Image (tube, rainbow, N blue to C red):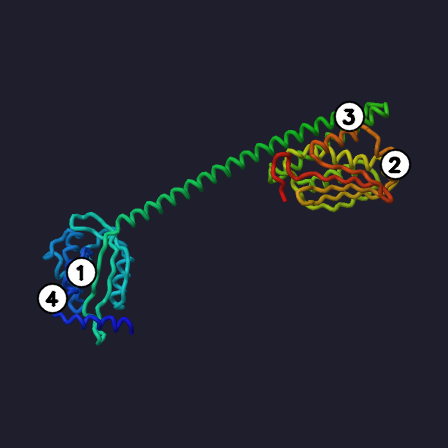
């Protein structure tokens, strides 16, 4: 309704068509390139063109009048866009679209075309009014932006592939190192086991057996790292499971193992210290909690505790007298040194029955942000 009323506003100007028509004068004088076509004639030819269009296209007026405006199209004009214009003409509706057109001298330019039908009150389409604007700078800038974006995305994808390949190579290298270290530790362990069997002095034999379990604990670390996907992180729970299982199986004791483990990763740099400390504590429990072939139960629990890792080793054995807890044995000194390296706290406490050892250590190495 508002559009129809706006159309009738032109009646108030009371001007005859021709030189006195202010709309015709405006179309002639504007710097916007404009043409008018007549759909009532064959092939919808151009019946009016202003000077701005002549300047834009490079054609003379007599070269344009009576022709369909498809002469502006060229080899790289988008056929799909042309079809959209045709569909709009057929449907008698407005369209605004960017088309690649060509001047008379063959130079291309991007044409922001706006096409609109002129329909009388009887519904008859009298003309099509079309304005053109050279927007080559805008379209070319958009294309440059798109090209730069695609180039950037290709470079990012290329760099990502390079980093992925580099990481894969690094992972393979680290795994190979862990594999070789594991094999070397197994060799040392085998040699030490052979030497231990030749020793008859009980204290010396005990020292060698203790050293053997420590080497085997480090071997378990490198075995786990070799099998892991993440070469920078070490899962305390997985290691505790493997270590406790191996130690109980190797001890030949009638000790039931209870595991309460929740995966907690720490930096791989912590792995040797964690391994040796857990080895000392589990070995100590097997050695002292169940004397004279006594059976029992050993529990190992690992869980996250905020920014820390909580480890508990508990047995239902004979318990540790206060004098034993305070005793400064080599294993106790080693455990204390490892705890300091890990910035960990370690507490021995008596249970009823048995003993509980509680360890609490940060999940990250010193100088790095704590990981929740």
| Residue 332's disc number | none
Which sits in the foreground, 309 or 263? 309
> Along the horizontal axis of the image, is 241 left or right of 119?
right
Q: Position of residue 275 (x, y in %)?
A: 71, 34
**Which quarter of the picture shows residue 331?**
top right
> Along the horizontal axis of the image, is 318 left or right of 226?
right
Marks 4/1 in contact by CB < 8 Å: the verdict is: no
Marks 3/2 in contact by CB < 8 Å: the verdict is: no
Which sits in the foreground, 336 or 41? 336
Residue corresponding to mark 1:
35
| Residue 321's disc number | 2
Q: Residue at x 51, y 35 (%)?
A: 166
| Residue 194's disc number | 3
In terms of secondary structure, where does tag 3 sit? helix
The residues tagged by marks 4 and 1 sit, at their Cα atoms, a distance apart of 19 Å
**Which quarter of the picture shows residue 222?**
top right
Q: Residue at x 12, y 68 (%)?
A: 17
Q: Nearer the viewer, mark 1 or mark 3?
A: 1
User: Of label 1 and label 3, which has the lower sequence position?
Assistant: 1
The residues tagged by marks 1 and 3 sit, at their Cα atoms, a distance apart of 103 Å
* Mark 2 nearby-residue class (10 Å; few <14, some 14–19, many ≥20): few
In terms of secondary structure, where does tag 4 sit? loop
Q: Position of residue 45 (x, y in %)?
A: 16, 63
The answer to whether residue 285 is above or below residue 91 is above
Which sits in the foreground, 306 or 125? 306
Marks 2/1 in contact by CB < 8 Å: the verdict is: no
The residues tagged by marks 2 and 1 sit, at their Cα atoms, a distance apart of 106 Å
* Mark 1 nearby-residue class (10 Å; few <14, some 14–19, many ≥20): many
Q: Position of residue 152 (x, y in %)?
A: 40, 42
Residue corresponding to mark 4:
20
> Along the horizontal axis of the image, is 116 left or right of 208?
left
């Amino acid at each position: 309704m508002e559009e129809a009323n706006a159309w009738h506003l032109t009646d108030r100007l009371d001007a005859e068509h021709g030189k006195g028509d202010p709309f015709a004068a405006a179309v002639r004088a504007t710097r916007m390139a404009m043409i008018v076509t007549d759909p009532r004639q064959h092939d919808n030819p151009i019946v009016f063109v202003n000077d701005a269009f002549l300047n834009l296209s490079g054609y003379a007026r007599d070269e344009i009048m009576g022709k369909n405006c498809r002469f502006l199209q060229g080899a790289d004009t988008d056929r799909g866009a042309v079809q959209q214009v045709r569909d709009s003409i057929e449907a008698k509706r407005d369209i605004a679209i960017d088309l690649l057109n060509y001047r008379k001298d063959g130079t291309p330019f991007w044409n922001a075309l706006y096409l609109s039908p002129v329909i009388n009150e009887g519904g008859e389409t009298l003309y099509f009014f079309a304005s053109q604007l050279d927007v080559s700078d805008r379209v070319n800038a958009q294309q440059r932006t798109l090209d730069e974006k695609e180039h950037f995305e290709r470079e990012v994808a290329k760099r990502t592939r390079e980093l992925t390949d580099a990481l894969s190579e690094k992972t393979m290298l680290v795994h190979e190192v862990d594999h070789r270290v594991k094999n070397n530790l197994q060799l040392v362990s085998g040699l030490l086991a052979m030497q231990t069997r030749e020793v008859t002095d009980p204290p010396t034999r005990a020292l060698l057996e203790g050293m053997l379990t420590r080497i085997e604990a480090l071997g378990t670390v490198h075995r786990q790292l070799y099998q892991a996907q993440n070469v920078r992180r070490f899962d305390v729970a997985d290691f505790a499971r493997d270590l406790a299982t191996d130690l109980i199986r190797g001890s030949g004791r009638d000790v039931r193992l209870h595991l309460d483990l929740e995966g907690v990763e720490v930096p791989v740099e912590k792995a040797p210290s964690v391994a040796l400390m857990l080895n000392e504590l589990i070995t100590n429990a097997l050695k002292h909690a169940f004397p004279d072939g006594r059976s029992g139960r050993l529990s190992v629990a690992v869980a996250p505790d905020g920014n820390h890792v909580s480890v508990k080793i508990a047995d239902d054995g004979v318990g540790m007298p206060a004098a034993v807890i305070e005793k400064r044995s080599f294993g106790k000194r080693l455990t204390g040194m490892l705890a300091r390296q890990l910035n960990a706290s370690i507490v021995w406490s008596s249970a009823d029955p048995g003993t509980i050892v509680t360890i609490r250590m940060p999940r990250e190495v010193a100088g790095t942000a704590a990981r929740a």
